[in-house]
Each structure stands twice: as C-alpha cells, then as structure tokens.
C-alpha cells in the first residue's frame, strides 16, 4: 500500500478507490458481528460465497461481510445494494433463492422481508423499517457498509478526511476548541465534558502524555462499544489520532476486554493497515505529527474498566482503582497526564471535525448534545443496538423502536446505567433521555445499556442481582464498598428467601449512604443505586417480600411454588415428561400432581403446559393446596384422548 | 514548595503544597482516626476511617484525609454528623470481622458503634493491608500478598518466601489491628505446606 | 479462595511458555499480557510458569499471584476438555438464566469457576456476550445455544465427552 503523506494524496487515493467501485454493481452485505455469528451468519456467509461461485457470478456480484447492523433480534441480516433491500433472519437454505431471485431476477422475496406486527405491511428497504427509521445513525450507520478488515471501505466513505483536515488546516488548539464547542460529553458513563478533559490533559505539566480508548465495556447487557470496535475500528482510530493531536500526545493505548476476541482482532488489522498507509506512525500526512497505538487486553475484571484502574492495569499491575483527587488527566499512566475516553466518544470526534461543532450541537438537548447508541435488550420485541438523538423519550425508544413488550406483558421498568444505574418506572416513560434527566430520576446514562423489564421481573431480585455482580467485581480494597456490599447482599438474599425483617429497608438505606459517601471509587459510590432506585419506585415489592413472604412477580424461588390446578389439568403428560427432576406424578388419565419436595422451581412445567389448558399456576405468599386424593385424580375420558 | 493555608475545624492551619489533609492536621495537633495508615508506608485509603468533610469550590464532600491533597482555602471538618455516622457504620462493618480487636474498641466507644450489629463474619482480617505493604515497601521481601477480589479478597503468605524470611522477622505482626495471632496462624499454616513447587501440596 | 490443587500434567509445553516469557523479558508492565498469552497457549497457569515470569519480568511473586487470582481469565488449575459459559448479563438474567445455571450445576456437579474431577467440563459465568436477542445464552466450546431453558440443558451437554 502506498504511503499517503499529504491530504491531497488522500483524496487521490479515495478517488482511485471509488473509481474502481461501481455504485450500481450488485453487492450483498451480510452482518458478521458477534451476535449474528451466534445466530449462524458464518454458515450463511459460506453459503453465499459458494452460491455466487456456483451461479458464475463472481465477477458480477460483490459480497461484503460487515460489522453489526444493530437489529440483532432479526439476525442474520442481509442488505442488497444498490437497492438497499433488507432481508432478515437468513438461513443458508435461503441463499440460492436470494441469488437467483433478487440478484439475478431483481425480484423481492416477500417472506424474507420485515413485517410490521400491527399492520402486517411488508417493508422492502432497511430505511423503511421502524427500528431503523426512528434512529439517527451518525456514528453507527457506517457499520453496514464497511468490511472492518478493509481500510479501503472506510476510505470510500470519506474516512480519514477529518484527520487530514485537522492536521493540515487546524492547530491543536483549534481542534480542542471545536470539541469544546460541540459540548460532547463522555459516552462511557460519566458524561464528563470531553473538551474539558482534553484541555486539562493538554495543560497538565509533563513532556509525555497518553490518550487511551476504554473498550472494557463491562456493563452486563451493553455491547455497543464491541459492535463499534468490531465493525468500524478505523472510526475509533481516526478519532483517537485527532484527539492525540489536540492534546499533544504521541502514544495511545486501546484497552480491549479479552472477552471481545473479534474486536481485538479487527482493531489489530485496522492498526496495521493504518500504519501501512501512514495514517499512524511518523509524520502523518506530512504534518510532522507522530502517533503510535498499542493494544492492551483486559483479563476479566469489571472494575478494571474504571479509568484509574484501567491505567493501573496498563502498567501491568492489578487493575484496582486509585483515588482520583488528582484527575488522571493530570496524573495517569506512570503518573503522566492521560486522557481516557470511551470508544463511542472517540468515534464521534471525526464527525465533529468534519461537520463542525455547530452541526453537532444542533442535535440533542441543552445539556446533552448529539446522539447516543443504546443497547435495547431484555423484555422488548426488537432487541438490538439503536442510535438516537439525546432528548428522545424512553417511551419512543421502547415502543416506537423497540416494538413494545413481547407476549402482551405489561411494562414494569427500564434499567439504565448498568450496576451503577437504576430502574425507571412507567410513570417516567415520557422522560427525555439525557445525562441529567436520567440522573434526576435516580439512574444514570452509563454506557448505554437499556434493559427493559416486564411484570414477570422481580425488582428485589434485580437489586440482589446487581449487588451479587458487584460483590464479585469490586476490587475489595476499601471497607465501605467491600463490606457495605457484603452486608447489603446478605440482607437482599435473606429478603428474597423469605427471611426479611422489619428494619431491613432502613438498614439498606443506611448502608447505601455510607457506601456512597466513603468509597474509594465510582464502583463503590454508585453500588447502592440499583438498591435505592428499586426501593424508591417499588417499595411495595420489598414490603411484600418482607411482611408477607410473597414475591409479587413470582420469581424468588424460595417464595414461590408451582401448582397444577386439578380443575384445569387434562393429564396430557407434557409437563410430566419434561420435568427435569421427575417431580410430577400422574398418568394418561390421571391428573398430574407436583411433588413439592422434589420440585426445583425450574419453571419448565409452567412453560410447557398448553395455553388452552393453562393448568400450571405459580403461588406465592400462601400455602400450596394439598394434593387431591388419588381416587379423585382419574379423568373420565369421554371417547378418545384429549391431547 | 509553596505554602498553603487551610481551615481545619475552624482553625487556620498552614501547610505545604503536596501535603495531605492528614499530614496537615497532624502537624497542627488535630487528631483524625486512622487504621490502615502508617508513617513508614505510602498512604493507602482502604479503611476510610479518616473520612472527613470538606468544602471546596462551593461543594461539600466526604474524602479520605490520608490521601486528599491540601488546597488553598480548603475548609475541613474532622467531626460532623455525617462524618461521625460514616465512621460508626464503618466500624460496625469491621467489628463484624473482629469484634474484640483492641484497636477497634476505643474507636467503637467514641462513635457508638455496636459490635453485634452485623452477624459475625468468618475472617478476622479487615484487609487494611499493613502487613502486605510493610513487607513490600519496608522489608522489600514480598512474602505476603493479596489474592482474589471483592468479598473474596484475602491476605496470604507465599510459602517459599515466608519459610525463609518470616521466622526471623515477624515485624508485621504487631501492625495487625485485629488479631496478631491470626497472622501467626496464617504463617504457620502456610509453612506447613512444603515450599518446593515440585513437591505435592497439601490441601489448604 | 479458589482451590489450588496442582494436578500433574504429563508434559507442560515449557518450550512455548519460555518463548512467551522471553519475549517480555524485563518488562514488568507486560505482566498481564504475558499471562494472557500463557493462559491461551496452555489453558492454565502452572506454578512453574508463574515462578519463571516472576524472575524474567522482574515482578515479585505476590503481585503475580494477585493478578492471577484477581482476573477471571486466568486459571491456576487445569481446565476441562469442554468449556461451558452461561451468560449472566442483565438481559439474560431476567429471561431466566439463573435457572439454566442451576440446571448446569446440577448436571455437572460443579459451580462457576470450577472444573470437574474428570477434567471434562469447566464452568464459568460471563457477564454479557452481546447476544441478548437470543437470551438466555449458553456457550459450549464456542458454540452458542440461544433461548436455553433448563429442560434443554441435558440434551446439549450429553453430546460432549
């Protein structure tokens, strides 16, 4: 690859790449992110390659494996260019038809299209599907067009032009001013003004300073950074290099959690390719600016994603947080000024440089500019990654984009901010999503995880779940976090087991206060948020568990029992056969009875009882009725079996 | 180093840039309780008993005095309702591990901490880290260290190093705020396992 | 504390491990990266390897021990032939992952972080695989099983020996 040592040469290269690409040539793009891999996109890819060859179309049809498209519920996803026909949930067996009918025959295959669940209308193009239509995919949108292993794809879309502009037309101070003007706030969770952090780092005393990409993404349920890094690594590299220029750093780190092997691989490829073209290394674009990047892998610790802990891990030591009375922007890695930002934050920078701070500041709310990528998951129909302007309501995200709650269940809460966040109830669904509004409601933006919960979710169990997570992930160094979480978890576990006592809620609140006020780092300081927000909005559930030994959502195993209603049971044997512990007694004409001693509350019987019978009930807070006597269990069949 | 004037408990205190609130307070004869602090060791900030209330830039906050650097015009309160409540609960959390530890008794009395508030935990150790840090920073032997994380975090001796170094040293034992005996117990137990890595190891 | 039973393995591929360690000689800050490579190559961290790393990278053994026990990626005991991962991310949790995990524990006899005595299965929980649409998710030897329910676990696991 030729070294591109001036912006002019970059434009030449771009023109050359584009000239070799015919925008009207059919191109099949297949989502190859980790989630689609899990749904079988590798097999679909193999099928496509085979079929293209088989039908003699190798010269006539392009095939591109791209990064995550975001609509993970419907993966694997194919988009056929130039028409942008979108096919969902593709299996290898669909491929020959796609090639023959759509590629060759230019005909749309109806059954592979998106169907609107309420109108039954079929939608041909990606941009018509409500899930995509209501998004503003500024940062994430390119994922569908790029093969992450091909820097030329990124260049074809205008990649690295922001870096060229910054290095050749702007001074570092001007780049810094632009980012400050945009009011971009960190997308990793804290929401700290990015421009201010850059400035602090730039002005800190010292010769050497570092820029760092935080790709540790530990919040369970959040995978935006992974998809961005896997699918469009160059956007992150370009943003990082621009930031390094503004700050005066010549060495960068990308800290990727080791649970993301594809991201590690794709970033490695991207770095190599960028180096070959000269977008990384010495004298970038002939500007005299040098910058190199190293990848550092995490080793499986949520707390190491905290900025000071991450820097300690880069030094090779145990990734425990340090006190941040002196900001890491002033004293970070090896006590040198270090500017750490999230993947999404860095990826937003090229857009701001290219289109300007004013353009960016037009989107979003007063306090939160631009867009944010959320992972919309849980009890929601359209699970996936969505990028929306700040200020959109929770209701719109969950219902317009998310398609509402599956199975006609009732919405209960949406959890944001991971283990540092809180649960937001129905009354607040019209909240405009931004950093400050979420904080006011007792939660936080966090990295963007948005877990939708329905009537079958127990909020006490949710609080216990997060504390359990934190008791494992806390570094354990300081007393308030380690011991505070230990005791809070004990209390919550007791409550979920029916051993709650009067005064438990007050004790939880007291411990929360100490943990919040005295902990060394943000993990400890925010550890109580899930507890406090669930107490705030769902106190009645806590009280039911404590006072009535009842779990209103029928989740806490120690407080529920499964019971087969003898009036409704038709002795179909389905639950009996599927019970993993053989706890159900009965026969073909014998009403089934669950042996409560053997029952492990796995819920299988409840799931498999045919809906037209609906004989399995969940009971909580009251004793299980005694089994009816054996003689009464015989069903008199009229003529043949009621199967 | 430039001079800094700050206020601690209503008194004007002169300190040098780079000092911590704890150092400044000690120099002015104002006492702040500590457990994991030691003059020969780098400040650690694990026990949080030195938590004090500060006012800076118009905001009130709770910080660890042993680590927070002094600032011009900083206002510090070493006792307040919030500070006292925090210290009380921290003590109660630690007393769950070591209810009879001598060093905790006086503090417990002063702050009204109830040693029976939380159920007794199985380990005496409050993970102040004095033993680990002393062996690393002063003796430079690293015969003892932390393992694991979260609520499972513990302190253990490295058998092959401890068997060589510890019998003649034991300087960390009196540092332990909870049970010096515990330290001996751990050491002995560790020494019962053969030091050589190629010999079969008995189950702990 | 994690159990530290040291199982004698027939041949610890010391050659490869030595190569990895030599690469990072004298670079204490590379400790975590070096251990990750050894773990990846050898599937666990034998004591001899930790001793070598301590000498070559010039890091005290107690620090290495803390790193090796602090991070989930490392195992101080040999792992089983088959790795089971059950996702316990929030989305999977509310879709019923704990019951799936219970069932796996019942059938394998081990808890997360453990390996069975036959060295057949190692079990671990992971905090989010990013396949929330398919939750609850269970991965065995890299193969993803989506929409897992307790009743199906036995069928999945019996395919592995």
Image: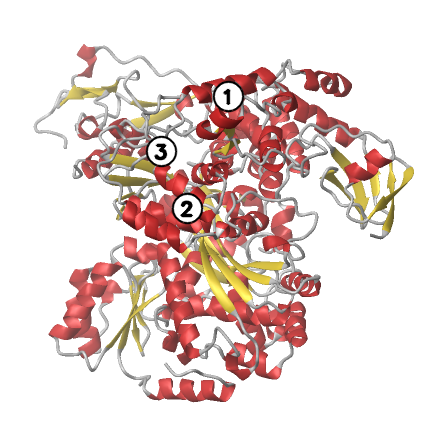
Q: Is residue C84 above or below residue B157?
A: below
* View extreme (left): residue: A639
* Relative to B126, B48 lies left or right: right
Per the image, the residue denoted by label 1 is: B187
* Relative to A23, A394 lies left or right: right
* Relative to A73, B68 lies left or right: right
Whether discs 1 and 2 lie on one chain: the answer is no
Q: Position of residue B121 (x, y in %)?
A: 54, 19
Crowding at mark 3 (Cα within 10 Å: few <14, some 14-19, many 20+): some
The CA distance from mark 1 to mark 2 is 49 Å
Residue at mark 2: chain: A
Per the image, the residue denoted by label 2 is: A378
Secondary structure of the residue carrying tag 2 is strand
The CA distance from mark 1 to mark 3 is 29 Å
Q: How many marks?
A: 3
Q: Position of residue B99 (x, y in %)?
A: 63, 15
Whether discs 2 and 3 lie on one chain: the answer is no
Residue at mark 3: chain: C
Q: Are marks 1 and 3 in contact (CB under 8 Å)?
A: no
Per the image, the residue denoted by label 3 is: C112
Q: Are marks 1 and 2 in contact (CB under 8 Å)?
A: no
The CA distance from mark 2 to mark 3 is 23 Å
The label shown at residue A304 is none
Q: Quadrant of residue B44?
A: top right
In the picture, the quarter occupied by the C terminus of chain B is top left
Secondary structure of the residue carrying tag 1 is helix
Q: Quadrant of residue A403?
A: bottom left
């Amino acid at each position: 690859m030729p070294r591109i040592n001036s912006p002019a040469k970059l434009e030449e290269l771009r023109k050359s790449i584009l000239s070799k690409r015919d925008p009207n040539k059919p191109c099949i793009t297949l989502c190859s992110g980790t989630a689609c891999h899990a749904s079988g996109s590798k097999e679909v890819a193999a099928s496509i390659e085979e079929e293209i060859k088989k039908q003699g179309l190798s010269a006539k049809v392009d095939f591109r494996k791209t990064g995550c498209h975001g609509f993970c519920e419907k993966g694997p996803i194919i988009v056929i260019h130039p028409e942008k026909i979108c096919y969902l949930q593709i299996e290898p067996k669909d491929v020959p038809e796609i090639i023959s009918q759509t590629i060759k025959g230019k005909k749309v295959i109806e059954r592979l299209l998106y169907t609107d669940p309420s109108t039954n209308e079929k939608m041909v193009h990606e941009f018509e599907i409500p899930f995509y239509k209501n998004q503003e995919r500024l940062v994430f949108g390119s994922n569908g067009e790029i093969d992450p292993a091909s820097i030329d794809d990124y260049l074809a879309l205008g990649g690295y032009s922001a870096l060229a502009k910054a290095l050749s037309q702007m001074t570092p101070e001007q780049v810094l001013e632009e980012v400050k003007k945009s009011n971009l706030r960190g997308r990793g969770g804290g929401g700290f003004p990015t421009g201010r952090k850059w400035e602090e780092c730039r002005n800190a005393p010292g010769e050497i300073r570092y820029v760092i990409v935080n790709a540790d993404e530990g919040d369970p349920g959040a995978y935006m950074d992974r998809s961005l890094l896997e699918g469009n690594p160059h956007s992150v590299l370009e943003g990082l290099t621009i930031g390094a220029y503004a700050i005066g750093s010549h060495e960068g780190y990308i800290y990727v959690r080791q649970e993301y092997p594809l991201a590690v691989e794709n970033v490695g490829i991207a770095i190599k390719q960028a180096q070959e073209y000269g977008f990384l290394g010495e004298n970038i674009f002939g500007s005299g600016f040098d910058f190199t990047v190293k990848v550092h892998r995490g080793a499986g610790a949520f707390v190491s994603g905290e900025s000071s802990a991450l820097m300690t891990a880069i030094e090779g030591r145990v990734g425990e947080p340090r006190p941040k009375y002196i900001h890491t922007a002033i004293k970070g890695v090896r006590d040198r000024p270090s500017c750490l930002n999230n993947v999404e934050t860095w990826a937003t920078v090229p857009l701001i440089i290219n289109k300007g701070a004013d353009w960016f500041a037009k989107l979003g709310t007063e306090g939160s500019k631009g867009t944010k990528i959320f992972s919309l998951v849980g009890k929601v129909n359209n699970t996936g990654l969505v990028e929306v302007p700040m200020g959109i309501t929770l209701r719109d995200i969950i219902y317009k984009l998310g398609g509402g709650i599956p199975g006609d269940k009732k919405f209960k809460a949406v959890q944001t901010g991971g283990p540092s966040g809180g649960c937001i109830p129905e009354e607040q669904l019209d909240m405009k999503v931004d950093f400050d509004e979420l904080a006011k409601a007792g939660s936080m933006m966090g990295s963007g995880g948005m877990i939708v919960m329905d009537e079958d979710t127990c909020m006490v169990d949710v609080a216990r779940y997060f504390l359990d997570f934190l008791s494992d992930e806390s570094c354990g160094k300081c007393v308030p976090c380690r011991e505070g979480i230990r005791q809070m978890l004990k209390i919550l576990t007791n409550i979920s087991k029916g051993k709650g006592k009067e005064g438990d809620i007050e004790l939880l609140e007291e411990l929360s206060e100490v943990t919040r006020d005295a902990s060394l780092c943000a993990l400890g300081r925010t550890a109580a948020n899930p507890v406090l927000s669930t107490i705030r909005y769902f106190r009645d559930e806590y009280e039911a568990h404590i006072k009535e030994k009842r779990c209103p959502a029928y989740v806490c195993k120690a407080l529920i029992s499964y019971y087969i209603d003898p009036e409704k049971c038709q002795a179909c044997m389905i639950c009996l056969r599927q019970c993993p512990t053989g706890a159900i007694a009965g026969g073909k004409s014998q009403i089934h009875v669950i042996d409560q001693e053997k029952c492990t509350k796995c819920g299988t019987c409840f799931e498999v009882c045919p809906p037209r019978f609906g004989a399995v009930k969940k009971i909580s807070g009251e004793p299980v009725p005694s089994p009816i006597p054996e003689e009464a269990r015989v069903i008199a069949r009229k003529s043949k079996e009621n199967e | 180093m430039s001079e800094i004037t700050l206020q601690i408990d209503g008194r004007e205190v002169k300190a040098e840039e780079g000092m911590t609130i704890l150092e400044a307070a000690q120099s002015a004869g104002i006492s702040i309780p500590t457990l994991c602090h030691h003059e020969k060791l780098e400040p650690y900030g694990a026990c949080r008993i030195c938590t004090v209330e500060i006012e800076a830039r118009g905001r009130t906050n709770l910080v660890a005095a042993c680590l927070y650097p002094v600032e011009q015009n900083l206002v510090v309160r070493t006792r307040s309702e919030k500070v006292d409540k925090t210290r009380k609960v921290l003590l109660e959390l630690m007393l769950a591990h070591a209810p009879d530890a001598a060093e905790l008794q006086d503090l417990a009395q002063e702050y009204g901490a109830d040693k029976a508030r939380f159920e007794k935990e199985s380990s005496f150790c409050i993970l102040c880290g004095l033993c680990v840090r002393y062996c690393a920073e002063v003796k430079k032997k690293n015969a003892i260290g932390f393992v694991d994380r979260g609520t499972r975090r513990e302190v253990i001796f490295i058998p092959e190093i401890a068997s060589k170094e510890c019998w003649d040293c034991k300087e960390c034992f009196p540092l332990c705020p909870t049970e010096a005996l515990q330290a001996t117990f751990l050491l002995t137990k560790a020494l019962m396992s053969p030091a050589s890595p190629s010999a079969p190891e008995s189950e702990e | 504390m994690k159990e530290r039973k040291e199982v004698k393995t027939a041949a610890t591929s010391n050659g490869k491990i030595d190569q990895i360690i030599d690469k990072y000689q004298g670079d204490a800050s590379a400790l975590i990266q070096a251990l990750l490579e050894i773990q990846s190559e050898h599937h666990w961290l034998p004591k001899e390897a930790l001793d070598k790393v301590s000498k070559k990278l010039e890091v005290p053994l107690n620090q290495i021990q803390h790193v090796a026990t602090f991070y989930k990626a490392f195992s101080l005991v040999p792992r089983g032939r088959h790795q089971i991962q059950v996702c316990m991310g929030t989305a999977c949790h509310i879709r019923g992952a704990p019951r799936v995990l219970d069932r796996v524990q019942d059938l394998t006899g081990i808890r997360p972080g453990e390996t069975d005595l036959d060295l057949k299965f190692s079990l671990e929980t992971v905090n989010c695989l990013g396949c929330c649409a398919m939750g609850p998710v269970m991965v065995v030897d890299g193969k993803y099983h989506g929409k897992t329910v307790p009743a199906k676990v036995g069928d999945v696991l019996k395919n592995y020996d």
